Amino acid sequence: MKPAHRLTALLLGASLLAGCELAEESANTLAEKAEAAAQEIAREAIGEAVNELNKRVDEVQASAKALLGEQRKEEAREESPRGPSNKHEGEEEDALLPPSGIET
């Protein structure tokens, strides 16, 4: 092979190698950008899902508090005894005795 052909083959080989290296770097850069974009999309989707979940939890908590408050009011009404219908509340024992007392 002539020296000119060798030089041409060498330059062609070197340029192919440089082209491959450049293509590899470009592919790596593109892959990194794609990965970063995918991570950002995932963060946004997860953030939206978490926000929606928090709203639902807040609604359930408010509902539960309202139900518990109503139950406590009902329990308090059921537990408080009705007073006697006479004027002297709390004197149930005296109300059962005749006004003159008990003879022995």
Image: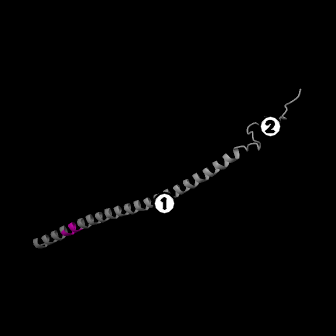
Q: Secondary structure at mark 1?
A: helix
On screen, residue 32 versus residue 54, left or right, reads left
User: Percent from the top left, x then y, of residue 85?
Assistant: 77, 44
Amino acid type, callout 1:
Glu
Residue drawn at point x = 85 percent, y = 32 percent = 100
Say which of 11 and 28 sits in front: 28
The kind of secondary structure the magenta stretch mainly shows is: helix
Task: Give the quadrant of the C terminus.
Answer: top right
On screen, residue 46 versus residue 15, left or right, reads right
Q: Earlier in the sequence, mark 2 or mark 1?
A: 1
Q: Secondary structure at mark 2?
A: helix
Nearest to the eye among marks 2 and 1: give it: 2
Check residue 97 for magenta coloring: no
User: Percent from the top left, x then y, of residue 47?
Assistant: 43, 59
Circle 2 residue: 95
Say which of 43 and 59 sits in front: 59
Circle 1 residue: 52
Check residue 16 for magenta coloring: yes
User: Percent from the top left, x then y, of residue 49?
Assistant: 47, 60
Amino acid type, callout 2:
Ala
Say which of 26 and 3 sits in front: 26
Residue drawn at point x = 77 percent, y = 37 percent = 92
Colour theme: one colour
On screen, residue 89 versus residue 10, left or right, reads right
User: Percent from the top left, x then y, of residue 66?
Assistant: 59, 53
Magenta stretch in the rendered image: 15-19
Per the model, the C-alpha gap separating discs 2 and 1 is 63 Å
